[in-house]
Each structure stands twice: as structure tokens, then as C-alpha cells.
Image: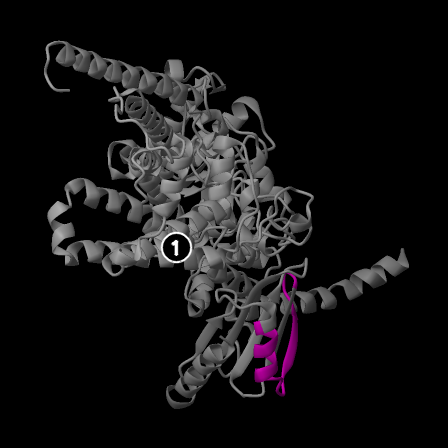
Amino acid sequence: MAEPETIGELLSERGISRRGLLKYAAYIASLMALPPWQSNAIADALAAARRQSVIWLSFQECTGCTESLTRSFSPTLENLIFNLISLDYHETLQAVSGEAAEEARRSAMRENKGKYIVVVDGSIPTRDGGVYGAIAGQSMLQILNDTAAGAKALIAVGTCATFGGIPHAQPDPTGAVPLTSLIKDKPIINISGCPPIPEAMAGTIAYLITFGRLPDLDHLNRPKSLFGNTIHDRCYRRSFYDKGLFAKSFDDEGARRGWCLYELGCKGPVTYNSCATLKWNGGVSFPIQSGHGCLGCSEPDFWDKGGFYHPLSTPTGHPTAAVGTAAVAGIGVGAVSALLARRAKRKATSTGEKP
Amino acid sequence: MTLLDFARGPALTVSFAVFTFGVAWRLLFVVLLPWSRDRAPARAAAPTAVLGAVRGFARHLWPRKAFAGAARFTTVNGYVMHFGLAIAFFGFAPHILFLQSVFGVQWPNLPSGLISVASVVTLVSLVLALGHRFASPVLRLISTANDYFSWFVTALPVVSGLMAVSHLWAPYEILLAVHLLSVALLLIWFPFGKLMHAFLVFVTRSETAVHYSRRGTVL
Amino acid sequence: MVSGVLREVAERLEALAERGECGVIDLKSLPLSSVHLQQLRERLGRGEVTAQLEILGPSEIWETRYPGVWWVRHLDVTDRVAAERIEITRVPDILSAALPDVVTAAQSLNDDLALYAAPRRESTDHGRT
């Protein structure tokens, strides 16, 4: 039997009816904040589209992003994304290894030149010519540049690929940089988070396949539909913040009553993501619901923002030395200027002038 | 580095240092200045210097009847502004966290609604003070850039704080950063302008009180 | 909030009646609490038609007290709400069989018939051996 040409044919072959695609389209439209009446058009577009070739490059990362995308899904609706794409290269998921794996990447690049999407997870080490990360004898920097050259668009998943993440945290021994620092001539979508919400990854890929263009992005290249609100804006504990009711420790009365975690260092007010609405693990919960403040993992440099348990309104610097020096200097200048004034007075008195 | 990172980090560190330097300098300078000895003998019934200073200071907390009117307004308005500011500054939970991180002490916070009321009252009071300064020909004559700038750096944290709490016009991270930067500006200006009265008021009023009480003048 | 949604439903229902225009309201994109949703469900009520679907997880569709206004609720296999919407149409698209599925069905029914016709001889052969 011939290879199915379109996603519609493939789904039909796999026993998923057009109704399934309609249901998926309704889900995607809601997820990506698209006009709901477009869901029929989305289903038609997806059915007619060819499977999207995807090359997934894993650099300085922990595989948590892949885990988030693959493990937390029950084999269902959300999982349909894997029928929409042809995952041509992914070190952790692919069956082949070694030279065969590299050949899979190269052949996908040849066959879909200018049409494939590159997903990058992990930051890229650049110090000392990028020697701190290599796959099959090639530096990660080199692999990225080669692979990105023929890509239609790139998606950075996870905070490492979007903003440098943990490898980029001080003292950043490998000179880790995000995708956007290296690739300037291709469209890039950032889906940040440590890890990102699986629906955010799946929804964005589905959007790209359906419309063949990027969704609306914010100033950090993140889809506005998913990163348009802060955690705080949509937090179910918001009313306690407004009333000034705060948990002071993780096991006090306030914590048990579910009061706001601002004082315990919650970064919800400055963190843009959909955790409070989409939640995690199939909609079970999200950090604040589980009693811990938001770490701000979908924001740049979240690791170096003065500590997870330091409230947002507190200074992050260590001013003791500066303040001590300033105090000594102030006392010195004050004493010297007073002494000069005294001397001037004494002089004036001794010469008979009026003080 | 985002604006908020800059505000929470270097901006506050620098402003703490400048504040400490300036306050130490000016206070020590005032204390060590050459004082002229008061050669006139004290009146027989004159209180000790300390008692005279305390009494005089207390006496100055409220104007005499003779000065009712304009002085009454500036006094009442001044108290409203200072108490409002104190309630908002010392009662708001995020401020307490700020102070705790700097000084290591902590106290219970007031409800956010009360803080908002206190802040709005403070702001109205500040606007009235400025209006009074413009309206009074004498005050306008003796006002300098120092007065207006000191007013500005006091009003700015109140306005930006209210905006940050109500999430008005800009995202919270921007409003919080602007609020913290306005506090940094206040701290930097503090020792060098009229705001230094927060420390010097004790020096000036006590000095005046001692001077007069030695001469048996009842303030 | 609830009456706002209802007013929009009313407007779209008029558009359907006068010009045959279909409409959809995505309930998940609105900041409705579960209490609001319950109120909305009660205000719209239930009409003559209820359909249970089993497509990549259960779905439930019912016509409300107002013909032409349908409540569509798609669940994941984990019973999480994947999409919840009010459709203003004569019949929700997802209920009617799509043409590609009909084509495939015709083909597979014919295949089944052929298979049914063929193996009878085979089975007799089989029985003999």
C-alpha cells in the first residue's frame, strides 16, 4: 500500500475519523486562543497538510522537556500531535543510533530542504569555539548552524533553549547561549518553561502545521495565547493577595488555608505562562496549588534572580560591604569638613575677626 | 538584566550606600561643627539642657493659638501626610519583607485595603501641600528647586506604589521596578536635600529650645 | 458574566434564524468559574437531543432548551475537559459523518462483503480437511 500523502489519509489509515480531527481542532483552537468558528477550517487544513518533518536537536539539557512532551500525555487527543509530525531525528526517542542516526538527520535535511522545522532543546555552549558540547564529533554549535540553514522555522523549547536556562546561570562555565543569540535569519518561536507545558509545545506545532506561519508572539518570541498572562493574573489564590492574606511559612495557618505565597518568594506576579489555567499532569495541579510558590521558570535568568524564597519586593544585592564603606567614608568626610570648619574658626578668632 | 533585576540589585545597593554616606556625613558634620559657647549665665529657674530640649520639641508639635489659620492647615496636613506615609511604609506586607531583608526584624502587616486608603490619603495630602505652596505668595517666594524636588521624590514612590498594587497601565514587573527605582531616587536625594529634615528636625528644634530655655523664655 | 454569554447566544441565534449564520462561543477562553458554568448550563437547560460520542475520549453534545443552541463538551480519556463550547447551528458538524469517512466506510463495507463472500468456500474447504 502506498505511503499516505496527507495527514487526513494517515489518520484515516490509523482509524482516527474526521470527527477525531474536528475534536482535536476544537481543542487546539481553544488552546491557542483562535476564533472558535475556525475549528472546521483548522481540521480541513490539517487533513490536507502533509506530515511536518521535524528535526529535534538536544543540546545542553536534561531531557526534561522531552519527558514533559512524551510522558505526561495519555495516549489520546493531545497525543495526536505525533500523527501530525514526522519526527525524523530525536536522539532520545529514535531507534537507530550512531552513524545511522546522523544519516537520518542529514537525509531529512536533504529531502525537506527549506520545509522542515527544527526543535531545539537545551542551550548551546559557545566558549572556546563551542568545545564543551559535541555529538558524533561535531560541536553543538556546528550542528545547529548546519541544521538551521535549511529550516523553515525553529522552535526553542524549554528555558535553556529560549533564554540559556541553567547552563547559562552564573558562572556559566561553557558560555551557554539561547537559540535566538545564534540564529538571526530564521523565524524562531520560544516556548519557555522548565519544562514547558506539554500543551504549549503541541499547540504551537499544530498551529505551525495548520497555518504555515508563526502565531502572535510577545517581545520574547513566545506565543501570546500561552504567555499573555502572568501566573498571578490567573491564580486562584489571587483574592488572598488582594486582601493582604499571606502564608508566612510553608506549614503555618495561612499555608493550610491556601493563602497567597508572595512572602514565601512566589514569582507568579512577574512570570508569564499558562500553568494556572492549563495546569500540569493532565490538569491535576500546578506548583501554587500544590503549596509552593512559582519559581518563575519561564522567564529569562530565573536561576539568578536572588533566590526562589526571597520575596519579589526585597533587594537582591548584597549591600553590606558597599553600605559599610559608604558609612566609613561619610563619617570621614563629615569629620574632616567639621575639623576644617573648626580650624577656620580658630584662625578667624586668633586674628581678631568675628567668628 | 531586566529593569526589575536592575532595580532590585544595583540600583538599591547604590542608593543604600549613597544614603548611608550622605546621612553619616551631614549628621557628623552638624554634630562636630564648632559651637559658640553661650557666655550668658543661665536663668535661675532654667531647666537642664535635655529637659529644655524635650519640652521645646514637644511644644513645637502643635502651633500656638496665635498662629491658627495657615499654620494650622500646614500642621494638620503635615501630620496626615506623615502618618499616612508611615502606615503605608511600615504596614504593607511587601514593605515589611523589604525592611526585614535589610534590618532583620519583622512585624505583622496591615490589611491591603487599609494601606491603599492610607496611600491615597497621603497622596491627596501631598497634592494639597503643593497647592498650598503655589497658592501662598510668601511660600512661593521662599520655595526653591530643593523644595519642589523633595516633594517630587516623596510623591513618586506613593504614586508608583499605588499603581503597582492596582496593576494599572503597565505590567507588574515594570511597575514594581519603577516603584523600587523611585525609592532608590528618594534614598539618593534624601541626605542632600530637604528630606534630611527627618534627622535634622531633632537637632534644629532641640537646639532652638535649649537656647531659649536657658534664657527663661517659655516657648 | 452569565447573562453576557446568554446575550451573545441570543444575538447569534437571531443571526442563525435570519441569515443562516452559524456561531461558536468558546467557554474555556472565558474567565468562567465552575459555578458560572453551572449557572449557564441551568439557564440554557436541556432540549430534545443528547448525543454521546466516543472519539479519542468521550464527548457529550446536547441541544439546549433553545433549538439551534448546542452545548458541546469534549473530554480527554482522563476525563479532562479538552474543549467546551456553545455552538449555534442547526446541527453540530461533528455529528454528521464527514465525506472522507463515508468514502472510507463504503470501501471497507465492500471489502467486508467481499471477504464475507469469499471465505465461505474456504471454510468449507477447511471443514473438509
Q: Residue B86: where, in percent of width, then height?
A: 42, 47
Tell me which residue sits at (58%, 88%) in the image: C65
Left or right of residue B132: residue C79: right
Tell me which residue sits at (15%, 42%) in the image: B144
Tell me which residue sits at (36%, 52%) in the image: B79
Q: Is residue B94 magenta?
A: no
Tell me which residue sits at (47%, 38%) in the image: B98
- What range is drawn magenta here? C36-57
Q: Quadrant of residue B37?
A: top left
In the rendered structure, which amino acid carries the disc numbered 1?
Ser
Q: How many marks?
A: 1
Q: Quadrant of residue B117?
A: bottom left
Tell me the quadrant of the picture where the C terminus of chain A can be found.
top left
Q: Which residue is mark 1?
A: B119
Q: Residue A172: where, in percent of width, then height?
A: 45, 21
Query: Chain under label 1?
Result: B
Residue nearest the observer in this picture, A107 or A257: A257
Dot 1 falls on a residue whose secondary structure is helix
Residue nearest the observer in this picture, A339 or A327: A339
Residue A239, placed above or below residue C8:
above
Residue C56, placed above or below residue A336:
below
Residue nearest the observer in this picture, A43 or C117: A43
Residue C103, placed above or below residue A217:
below
Q: Is residue C40 magenta?
A: yes
